[in-house]
Amino acid sequence: MTATTSLPALRSVAEEAHAAPQPVEIQPIEIRTRSLSLSYGRKPALLDVSLDVPRHQITALIGPSGCGKSSFLSSLNRLSDLLPNCRVAGEIRIGKTDVLDPATDVVALRRRVGMIFQKPNPFPLSIRRNLELPLKEHGVRQRSELDAIVERTLTEVGLWPEVQDRLDRSALTLSGGQQQRLCLARALALEPEVILLDEPCSALDPISSGVVEDLIASLRGRYTVVIVTHNLAQARRIADRVAFFWLRDGAGRLIEEGPVDAVFDRPRDELTAAYVRGSRG
Amino acid sequence: MDEPIAWAALSAGRSRASGRGIVGRSADRLAAVIVWMTAAAVSAVFLWLLSDLVRHGAGQLSWAFLVDPPSNAGRAGGIGPIVQSTAWILMIALGVALPIGLGTAVLLAENTSSETLSGRLVRRSLDVLAGVPSIVFGLFGNAFFCVYLGLGFSILSGGLTLACMVLPILIRSTEEGLRAVPTEYRLGGAALGLGRLTILTRLLLPAATPGLVAGVVLGFGRAIAETAALIFTSGYVDRRPESVFDSGRALSIHIYDLAINIPGGELNAYATALVLVMILIITNSTASWLGGRLHAQHLLS
């Protein structure tokens, strides 16, 4: 029974691989959305989005403002629950978890699916407490373990040499770029599998932006990354796959999706071609 | 072709602008003078009041005045029992109002959107309640606590009545404090899988401390200065209270009584008023200092 049902799926994956012009590394799908729609009150923000995000790759969501990219992102960790009048319909699966099932433990979900916002949002606590608060919430209480995680994650985002002697100073004394890296460290400390980034560089100066971008690129292979960006050059530099969203009839839709080179160099859709050329949007 | 016109427009604009500039500058100066004068007037009233109190009342002040019971209807002796009654009334008022106020403020700020009918209704009624004359609270307190609940003229009745009176101030001020906390903390906390209680106690309430402290200071000030509401509820027996079920005289009532009903009580009325104002100044500065420290400490440890 299982063998017969899995056979066609295998064949279709093989066919896709065969049809692709370049050798494609086949990755298992980590996030799968089907007919995902999202609305604020009566106003639709996102309509009928079906997208597969492969495991441990970087998927960039591009498109003009207001076409539902951030809404899409916030539905993946159910942060949409907190947005006023926000309703989500359709299906989202991350791994084996049915995200939109009301019975899903959102706290556990959000631990596995970290999120970084456009504006760095460290809590008005010390650098150390910023990292420890979520860890303690998730049951890490031993001092030695906490210290080890703090050092490991701050090292991972390259912040350790800069802050190791002022861990007890307010996180708000850090620069914008440092704050954003702290937020990333805070998310990484929970050992998530998926990291969602909502325009993480757009509020930063070019140098900080470059540092954070390199950091995001370094997440490939270890985390499944979905990043919203308005910076096409950035998408091209760091993404494995690109999904292009566009506003049509008042609602955001997924127009085209594929490997980064395919979307940028051989787009199938007219809109995508115009957008990546810079003549639309 | 276009150029002369453009230049003309530009120079006309400039002359208009500079013409307005001179007027604007003197208007600015005038505005600054008026603002400074109003500020100075406010400070002058306060200083005049304080110096008047000090001039007439300071001579009476001594340790004995603060602890001794009044004698000869308050013309002689001290205000010991009255200070004690006042402290008890205030402790009851704030002890009851603080937890209820905090809970209501959290509910209003975090669980009801400001647009819903119930949210608007609660807020509007709180605002109206905050402006209700204290004599009305006094009559309500008398009818409800003294008569209906059978607490009689007592410190408990007075404290509970004052609690009702300061609740609206406390709630609205704390609510505003909570609303002023950036949404990013809520979203950021939730995105890290923090529970609502953790977000509230670790992030929102510490950040809202200034609002809470302002509410407490305002509420305390209104409560300690209250006279009308207490005449009908805690009464004006000037004996030392033995329990909260005894009637007790508050400082403000003592001042009122000495100034209006007791010929020859003026000096002690002045001294009592000075004590009252000093308590107010001391508690206000302590509260803001403590609030600032708590705020900083909690957020940084």
Image: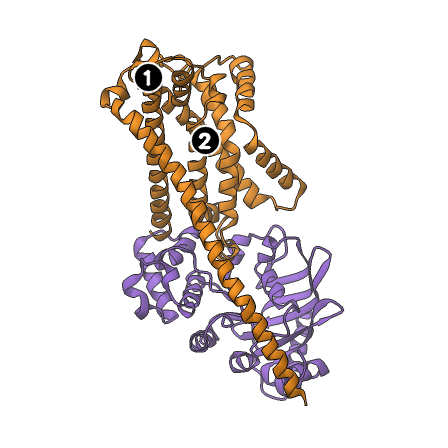
Chain colours: A purple, B orange
Q: Nearer the viewer, residue A138 or B28?
A: B28
The quarter holding residue B119 reads: top right
Local crowd size for mark 1, using a 10 Å CA cut-off: few (<14), some (14–19), many (≥20): many
Residue for point 38% across, 13% down:
B262
Circle 1 residue:
B81
Where is residue B218? Give x, y as percent: 45, 36
Q: Which mark is residue B222?
A: 2
* CA separation in Å, label 2 and label 1: 21 Å
Who is closer to the viewer here, B239 or B263?
Answer: B263
Between discs 2 and 1, the one toward the N terminus: 1
Q: Is residue A209 above or below residue A38?
A: below
- The answer to whether dots 2 and 1 both sit on one chain is yes
| Crowding at mark 2 (Cα within 10 Å: few <14, some 14-19, many 20+) | some
Indicate the secondary structure of the residue bearing disc 2. helix
Mark 2–mark 1 CB contact (< 8 Å): no
- What secondary structure is found at the residue carrying circle 1? helix
Q: In the rendered structure, which amino acid carries the disc numbered 1? A: Pro
Front-most of residues A79 and A36: A79
